Amino acid sequence: MSVPPPPAGIRSRIVSLLPTRADLDQMRRHPRRDLLAGLTVAVVALPLALGFGVSSGLGAEAGLATAVVAGALAAVFGGSSLQVSGPTGAMTVVLVPIVADHGPGGVLTVGLMAGVILVGLALLRAGGSMRYVPAPVVEGFTLGIACVIGLQQVPNALGVSGAEGERVLVVAWRAGQEFVRAPDWTAPTLALAVAGTMLIGARWKPTVPFSVLAVIAATAVTQAAGLDGARPIGDLPPGLPAPSLSFVDTGALGSLLAPALAVAALAALESLLSASVADGMTVGQRHDPDRELFGQGLANMAAPLFGGVPATGAIARTAVNVRTGATSRLASLTHAAVLAVIVFAAAPLVSRIPLAALAGVLLATAVRMVEVGSLRAMTRATRSDALILVLTAAATLVLDLVQAVIIGLGVAAVLALGAVARQARLAPLPLDRGDHTEEEHELLAEHIVAYRIDGPLFFAAAHRFLLELAELADVRVVVLRMSHVSVVDATGALVLKDAVTKLRRRGILVLASGVRPAHRQALASVGVLELLRHEGREYVTTPEAIAAARAHLERAGVLRATGHRTPAPRAEHR
């Protein structure tokens, strides 16, 4: 019996979510630049993929399979040209209780179900709704997830085996007790050395991949010295496993529906947040949220077939991709291809990496996830913001992690109604049009970043991202393009003030263009407007701010005085 074709409306909707000829044309413009960016991202992603695979409970090979399969499919079908996808710490936290209750097959089944849900959300055009998740919920999740990631590393960091379970607090406590009974300082020394190298190195030489260098050094030391206290990853199969269907029985699908919904919601939130960050860092890029959900859905449907865990867009890897010059999807595809080559060609070498070294990588990652200034600013803003942040973080840390995700998103849904109402009263602003790739890279070469701020959710993601920006490359001036900001409240103003203050302490000049009159009072009340003035001036358009940035760098001797002419203001520059 033949299957009837889908209705014309559904067909056209699916076609609108598929790759276009324009994507291929974009990949042909700067292939050398994209290949180099993809190689750089792969170097950064390798230890993270291994570490998150181990933390998930499915092993290092699961993390690599996810980075390769999900990374490639999300690059082709996703809604952002610069997004890099793979295993992330937030997703790993959610998977731990699923492994404890249902085993590895449960994780693979949940990943497949979550992928189907994400594709359904894309067909329903639900991508745009994710932008209204309030900042305190995002920051609360981030804080709780960072704490859980750190606690998950305690057994491997102490070189203790057999400390397993669903509750990370209990597991970490038992691992500590076991270490005290028979202390061996090999593993803790390696873990602290790797973490310290990453944290200090990121401030000293931001462009150097210290995570890889530290892991290589730790592996070389343990192999040369024959240290018994540093357990290696273990044997890795050469290449990706053949597609299989090692899932749970159909009778258990009902009990996995809630975890699958939580995984899908977290994948959607983190991926769209990361794509928004990539947009903000570029001049002419704008992601398609529904297509991004579609691409992440396909990626999560395919990854479990190869033994991979659920994947999302990764903010840190995406930021590295943009900062190293990526212009198209070719960079993300190259990242996946390089990791695939490593899987096939270097599995024996990778298998010798000490688990303690990977624990150090993830400990440093957890530390960098927590931005104290942002948390302090939010808790000072309003009592409701502080309460939501603390409750979300505590639920993520103490409760069943899947339940915590559902609770947090439930709170987000309620609070988003107010944000939607406020947004509805604002007239839409014109969006960027055209290709500004060459202009963008000219600015990058001049140590200037023009960061576009969109919508009410900028402050949920950009505070941490702006600070990471200073650690990823030699940035001297950041221009905040604020004409597209729709809502600025006390929380946003305080968080922005903290970010600008810290960037200035690092010697980075921060300018702003296009501050709307409706936002001036909120920004001025906390003192951030004064911080954004340069020599007593404010800038109406981005070209004016960029001209001031170049003049500042010429006076500082960073740029040669070339007589740059300020281009005529255009709508997309405001």
Image (cartoon, helix red, strand yellow):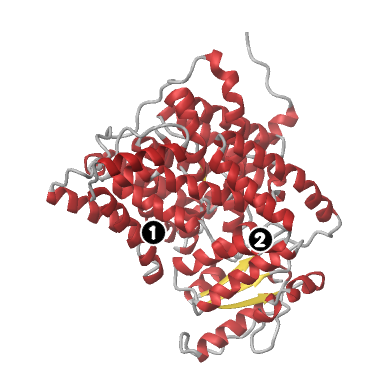
The residue identified by callout 1 is: 36
**Could you tell whether 255 is left or right of 242 in the image?**
right
**166 is higher (above) or lower (below) than 429:** above
**Position of residue 458 measured from the top left corner of the image (x, y, whole percent):** 66, 60
The residue identified by callout 2 is: 378
On the question of residue 18 being in view, the answer is no
**Could you tell whether 211 is left or right of 148 in the image?**
left
Q: Quadrant of the C terminus?
A: bottom right
* 434 vs 311, nearest the viewer: 311
Other-residue count near label 2 (Cα within 10 Å), few / some / many at <14 / 14–19 / ≥20? many
**Position of residue 377 measured from the top left corner of the image (x, y, whole percent):** 64, 64
Residue shown at 50% from the left, 80% from the top = 507
**Position of residue 30 measured from the top left corner of the image (x, y, whole percent):** 46, 60
**411 is higher (above) or lower (below) than 480:** above
**Could you tell whether 434 is left or right of 204 in the image?**
right
* 160 vs 209, nearest the viewer: 160
On the question of residue 538 being in view, the answer is yes
Rendered image quadrant of residue 229? top left
Residue furthest to the right in view is 425
**Could you tell whether 249 is left or right of 375 in the image?**
left
Q: Quadrant of the N terminus?
A: top right
Residue type at tag 1:
Leu
Marks 2 & 1, CB-CB < 8 Å contact = no
Report helix, strand or loop for mark 1: helix
Other-residue count near label 1 (Cα within 10 Å), few / some / many at <14 / 14–19 / ≥20? some
Q: Give the alpha-carbon distance from disc 2 to disc 1, as whole Å.
A: 38 Å
Report helix, strand or loop for mark 2: helix
Mark closest to the chain's N terminus, 2 or 1: 1
Residue type at tag 2:
Met
**Position of residue 72 measured from the top left corner of the image (x, y, whole percent):** 46, 42
Residue furthest to the top in view is 1
Residue furthest to the front in view is 181
